[in-house]
């Protein structure tokens, strides 16, 4: 089997992360595990209600290696909550998981964020791996060790930085992903290109986003972009904030819709708003802003009923983790493939409330 391997150890960390990408990867997982870690006392696979059949397949392969259990929760962003985290922790305890137990998060970004979170706090942290099954998880969320849950005061407001020991990506999972979910991954792919790779942007421009086989070809490129950024700045002291392009407005829209607006659609709208702010500030070159607009227009959908409540969005933006001392801060593009740095080298730019609200009016 042809495997792509990306390994990195974040600068501020001692623990490496190995990413393996290949079609039909399950049989590889067990042999790779042996080279990565000592034999675990148990394996717990966390998954959601839609993906149990895949979890059972993985359990079949892994149970020859160590006692393997599956724990699951109802699919959906609304389950990325404290309550589900507590339920999972109780299940770990009931199964007798100890510090030598390991976890596999098999699923989309919700399983990954939640599974990573409980792995990071159970017994003060146990080793975990990702097996991402959605396009979004394969091109973005499975890398970087950001874990988290949503709270009533905002999305991802509670969480940890905790690197997975490994990530196993099988692009064939995408074949069964509902079409409507694809846009979530595409949004993060487009974001990756705008923040870091003009070449990827040009390839995406020529792409037929309806072809799943074509989408699969971008997975490794996106993983390389993200691992390079995380490797340089694991804890988001500066550079890593560029991965949040489109997400200040995006997360606010998502939370204020009570998660009826998907992450991908929110990020697309978020990039439209934040790109416009960058252009108004004279940061984003006009011709590149136009190119971004043309790209994002492809994903406009009439069915998306967004009723932006400006005051509420402003509240969420001020709660955003990049904002501080009551000032909204965003990472903004200078041109396609390059993010702006202030004179002092900071990737975050203060944005006035007036400009923020102006960008919302455009949506
Ligand atoms: N940690 C990070 O760095 C990071 C980065 C980006 C996004 N995220 C988070 O990721 C989440 C969104 O992830 P998502 O879009 O994967 O959502 P998701 O996990 O809810 O998955 C979407 C739906 O697709 C189903 N699904 C997943 N894989 C499937 C497959 N192969 N076949 C059939 N159905 C499948 C799931 O069961 C779910 O119903 C958000 O919570 C977002 O905040 C985290």
Image (cartoon, grey):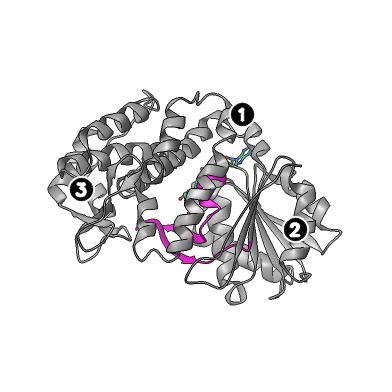
Q: CA distance from mark 3 to mark 2?
A: 50 Å
Residue at x-position 68% and y-position 76%: 99
Count of numbered labels shown in the rendering: 3
Residue at x-position 55% and y-position 46%: 137
The region drawn magenta spans: 138-165
In-front residue for pair 152/122: 122
In-front residue for pair 66/33: 33
Q: Is mark 2 within 8 Å of ligand 1?
A: no
Residue, disc 3: 311
Q: Earlier in the sequence, mark 3 or mark 2?
A: 2
Q: Earlier in the sequence, mark 1 or mark 2?
A: 2
Asked if residue 21 is positioned above or below residue 233 in the image, the reply reads above
Name the residue at the front extreme.
Answer: 199
Name the residue at the left extreme.
Answer: 354
Residue, disc 2: 32
Q: Quadrant of residue 122?
A: bottom right
Whole-percent x and y of residue 40?
Answer: 76, 70
Residue, disc 1: 213
Which quarter holds ligand 1?
Answer: top right
Whole-percent x and y of residue 253?
Answer: 33, 43
Residue at x-position 73% and y-position 44%: 54
Asked if residue 110 is positioned above or below residue 147 in the image, the reply reads above
Q: Is mark 1 within 8 Å of ligand 1?
A: no
Q: CA distance from mark 1 to mark 2?
A: 26 Å
Whole-percent x and y of residue 209?
Answer: 50, 26
Q: Residues within 10 Å of mark 2 (few under 14, many from 20)?
A: some
| Residue 76 in sight here | no
In-front residue for pair 114/141: 141
Give the structural element (helix, strand or loop) at label 3.
helix
Asked if residue 32 is positioned above or below residue 205 in the image, the reply reads below
Q: Earlier in the sequence, mark 3 or mark 1?
A: 1
């Amino acid at each position: 089997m042809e495997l792509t391997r990306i390994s990195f150890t974040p600068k501020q960390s001692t623990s490496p992360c190995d990413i393996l990408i290949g079609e039909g990867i399950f049989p590889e997982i067990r042999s790779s595990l042996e080279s990565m870690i000592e034999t675990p006392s148990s394996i717990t696979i966390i998954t959601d209600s839609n993906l149990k059949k895949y979890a059972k397949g993985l359990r079949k392969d892994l149970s020859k290696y160590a006692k393997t259990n599956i724990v699951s929760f109802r699919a959906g962003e609304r389950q990325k909550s404290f309550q589900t985290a507590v339920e999972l922790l109780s299940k770990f305890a009931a199964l007798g998981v100890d510090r030598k137990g390991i976890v596999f998060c098999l699923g989309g970004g919700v399983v990954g964020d939640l599974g990573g979170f409980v792995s990071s706090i159970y017994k003060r942290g146990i080793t975990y791996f990702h097996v991402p099954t959605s396009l979004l998880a394969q091109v973005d969320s499975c890398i970087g060790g950001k874990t988290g849950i949503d709270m009533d005061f905002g999305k991802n407001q509670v969480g940890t930085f905790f690197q997975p020991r490994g990530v196993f990506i099988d692009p064939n999972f995408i074949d069964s992903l509902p079409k409507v979910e694809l846009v979530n991954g595409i949004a993060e792919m487009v974001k990756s290109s705008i923040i870091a790779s003009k070449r990827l942007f040009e390839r995406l421009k020529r792409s037929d986003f309806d072809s799943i086989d074509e989408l699969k070809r971008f997975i490794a490129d996106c993983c390389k972009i993200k691992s390079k950024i995380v490797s340089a700045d694991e804890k988001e002291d500066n550079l890593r904030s560029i991965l949040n392009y489109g997400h200040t407005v995006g997360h606010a829209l998502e939370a204020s819709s009570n998660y009826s607006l998907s992450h991908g659609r929110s990020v697309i709208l978020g990039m439209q708003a934040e790109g416009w702010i960058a252009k108004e500030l004279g940061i984003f070159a006009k011709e590149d802003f136009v190119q971004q607009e043309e790209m994002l227009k492809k994903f406009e959908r009439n069915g998306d009923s967004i009723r932006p409540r400006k005051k509420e969005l402003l509240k969420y933006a001020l709660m955003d983790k990049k904002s501080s001392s009551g000032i909204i801060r965003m990472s903004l593009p200078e041109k396609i493939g390059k993010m702006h740095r202030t004179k002092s080298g900071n990737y975050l730019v203060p944005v006035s409330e007036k400009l923020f609200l102006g960008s919302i009016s455009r949506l």
